[in-house]
Image: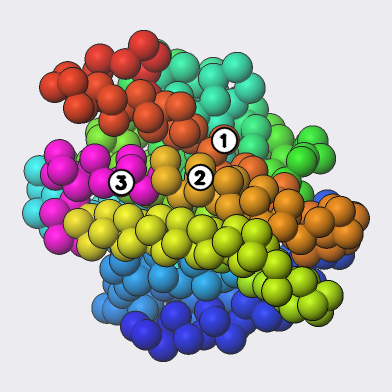
Amino acid sequence: MMQAVQVARRLAPRFAARAADHDRDGTFPADDFRDLREAGLFGLMVPRELGGLGATFGEYAAVATELARGNGATALVFNMHASVTGALGAVTEELAETLGLPDAALAARDRLLRAAADGSWYAVAMSERGAGARLSRLSTVYEPVDGGWRIKGSKTFCSGAGHADGYLVAARSAADPSVVSQFLVPAGGGLAVEETWDSLGMRATSSHDLHLEVTVPADRLLGGVEGLALVVAQLMPHWLVASYAAVYVGVARAAIDAAAEHLNARDLGGLPAVRARLGRADAAVAAADLVVAEAARRVDEAPGDAETNRWVWRAKLLAGTTAADVAASVLEAAGTAATRRGHPLERLYRDARCGSLHPATSDVCADWLGIAVLGGDPDRDGSAPRW
């Protein structure tokens, strides 16, 4: 699997060379995704027996960090695809039996994973205006129809909207709103993209609104059983929380790299204050990287374990806050010249600032961890529902 990390490391400079134009214009980095497809990385989380690379969560984190050193926006969208395929691939026969999943649903899962190994990629359509990522508050609804399911609603912050081959859509049952299910909706008729994404950072993710009024075949209900969305959120919080963390470690490291290049080119490395800022930044990013790696190791060894989940939330909190703090500090070290539009540090500063805002936000992560420290149940004792 080190080969996948090396491939990501090789692709990163290509992504970096294109990043400024996509950031400036708010355009999707289609060439980056062509490179990812040709490199076989869409199959990163697909089990080997289905044609993929069979990566662990830890290996995914290493790949995502390298991709983000090239372009954080590309890595962020890739994270969504990895989350879908990673969660599908993690459904073992034992877990399937525990959840009562029918054989037909497992066959449908395998078809989706084989398609990913062959070059298809999936986006996530979960968040909604007014509800955020809270599954229990969604307004998108579904109902059974002959031969399938009818889904109607609107999503926001759908990274890769208009470019993906399919979308993981979370929706509530029209008959029983307490039941939340997920569907893999293919691109095509019944989906409409509204170009709403014009943001401070991560401008190249094409995280537009997605409107759905579509009928999908019965086998597009993931797991073949209604109501699994909240269960999966509890069993696999790493894909909903910590998978972003590796991306922002990579963005933070890219900011240090860009600052060093800028400072060396201007012969400013002799200033002790400048060196101190870079030194602190280096140590902070190394620490965040270790926390992400430890969380990933625990996910691979004991997924869903209470202590594993604490590391998952720690990783998301530290990666988001570290990226923002480091990017701000090295930008100050580089000086006013680095704040000009088009300078790599100016873009990385804006991208890094987004890490704390992704669900779960840094405040939510800190609250979750604080409840755990106090001996409570952080999934139930918070002031707001997590999902």
Position in image of residue 92 (x %, y %): 17, 58
Please tell me which residue is depicted at 14% across the width and 54% down the height of the picture: 302
Mark 1 or mark 2, which has the lower sequence index?
Answer: 2
Find residue 312 and name its label: 3
Type of the residue with mark 3: Val
Position in image of residue 74 (x %, y %): 64, 62
Q: Secondary structure at mark 3?
A: helix
Position in image of residue 115 (x %, y %): 47, 69
Please tell me which residue is depicted at 64% across the width and 72% down the height of the picture: 257
Q: Secondary structure at mark 1?
A: loop
Q: Secondary structure at mark 2?
A: helix
Mark 2 or mark 3, which has the lower sequence index?
Answer: 3
Please tell me which residue is depicted at 31% across the width and 16% down the height of the picture: 382
Query: Which residue is denoted by mark 2 in the rendering?
Result: 320
Q: Give the side of residue 235 with respect to residue 86, left or right.
A: left
Find residue 357 and name its label: 1
Marks 1, 2: nearer the viewer: 2
Please tell me which residue is depicted at 60% across the width and 58% down the height of the picture: 277
Q: Give the side of residue 367 with respect to residue 380, left or right.
A: right
Tell me the CA gap for discs 1 and 3: 16 Å
Main SS of residues in magenta: helix
Position in image of residue 325 (x %, y %): 58, 46
Q: Give the side of residue 31 with respect to residue 293, left or right.
A: right
Using the rendered image of the protein, determine whether residue 187 is visible from the camera's viewpoint: no
**Residue range (magenta):** 300-316
